[in-house]
Image (cartoon, rainbow, N blue to C red):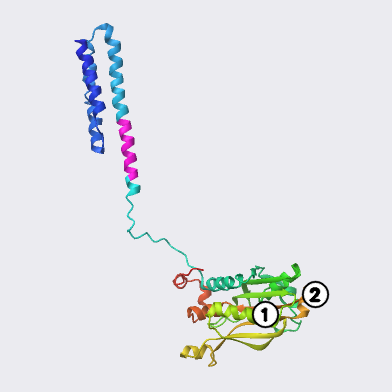
Amino acid sequence: MSNSVFEKIDAMLHQIQGETIHSAEELESFRIKYLGSKNTIKPLFGEIRNVPNESKKEFGQRLNDLKKTAEETFAKAKGELAKVEADSKANNIDLTAPYARSNKGSRHPVSLVMNRIIDIFEKIGFTVEEEREIEDDWHNFTAMNTPEDHPARDMQDTFYLKDSVTRLLRTHTSSVQARVMTNTQPPIRIIAPGRVYRNETISARSHCQFHQVEGLYVDKNVSFADMKQTLLYFAREMYGPDTKIRLRPSYFPFTEPSAEMDVYWGLETDVDYRITKGTGWLEILGCGMVDPQVLDNCGIDSKEYTGFAFGMGIERQAMLQYKIEDIRLLFENDVRFLSQFNAAY
Ligand code: DAH
């Protein structure tokens, strides 16, 4: 009698070990069959009555082992199924599905143009200098040879800090020339991009804040020809390989001689007529040989060194490039405007 009870346990053990569980349904039937409230192991416990006393202990142990095997088989199969499911989820990515568009930002057109200009000059060895927007009178004006009575220094033109006659918002990036030259001896080859401020009435054409890129090259034997070649290189990188430039004599307090550079834009459309005032030429920047007095003001020996400098506005170039008619759009930060600019820079 007792033998047949043990045989039942063995048979059940074999049955459990032979079960295949490959799906959630099979797992559930296994659970109901061996672990549920009406499971098939339970009745075996009742058979203890038919087991002789000396074998009762072994019988109990074997039954417990059987139950344990059922529980372990269930847990193992459950774990494996969960893993298979996770793997298949990971492998089931539809590579052709359209991706959920995230809110991708875009660069500001002023940054786009500025970064391009920086790139062009970095290629020929200029390094970027960034300096303060709150300047003192000396770096912005005095060092740059702007006389005490020059109209640019007037409150009408310059924002001074409250209760100060010496601290101001820089009116041009030329102040960075003075910063760099008082700190470093030549060779100096830098560009200085940044924001500048002028006390202007805001309109479609002018704003009280805008951006410039300044350039400065000081070394032994730097010539006007070096400047012209550098600026020609810049114009051709920026506006195309066939771009023509011209230098018109001009005046700036900090350069001597001074010039303004135009690029030939063409006269094909009405717009070309309007923006070039009928000449076909567009003024892009101011430039010149650094006035020896400026070098001396900043502690650089003007008998030993010469240099050239240039400064250009960014907004106008951005407006030309992207056909923006109103400068105010560049400072309002309306996303409908900004999201139109997607470019590599
Ligand atoms: N600072 C001048 C301006 O704001 C631009 C300029 C002209 C810069 C000639 C220069 C230069 O470095 O050489 O209008």
Total numbered labels: 2
The spot of residue 210 in percent (x, y) is 59, 76
Cβ atoms at labels 2 and 1 below 8 Å apart: no
Label 1 packing within 10 angstroms: few (<14), some (14-19), many (20+): some
Q: Is residue 115 visible?
A: yes
Q: Which residues are magenta?
A: 74-87
Secondary structure type for disc 2 = loop
Furthest residue in direction bottom, as rendered: 278
Question: What residue type is disc 2 on?
Answer: Asp
Q: Which residue does the numbered mark 1 point to in the structure image?
A: 226
Secondary structure type for disc 1 = helix
Question: What residue type is disc 1 on?
Answer: Asp
Earlier residue among tags 2 and 1: 1
64 vs 287, nearest the viewer? 287
Q: Which residue does the numbered mark 2 point to in the structure image?
A: 301
Left or right: 104 as drawn, with respect to 176 = left
The spot of residue 259 in percent (x, y) is 66, 86
Q: Is residue 162 visible?
A: no
Q: Is mark 2 within 8 Å of ligand 1?
A: no
Q: Which quadrant holds residue 72?
A: top left
Compared to residue 78, the image places residue 294 above or below, namely below
Main SS, magenta region, reads helix
| Residue at mark 2 to residue at mark 1: CA–CA distance | 20 Å
Front of the two marks 2 and 1: 1
Compared to residue 56, the image places residue 208 above or below, namely below
Label 2 packing within 10 angstroms: few (<14), some (14-19), many (20+): some
Give the quadrant of the N terminus: top left
The reply to whether the magenta stretch includes residue 125 is no
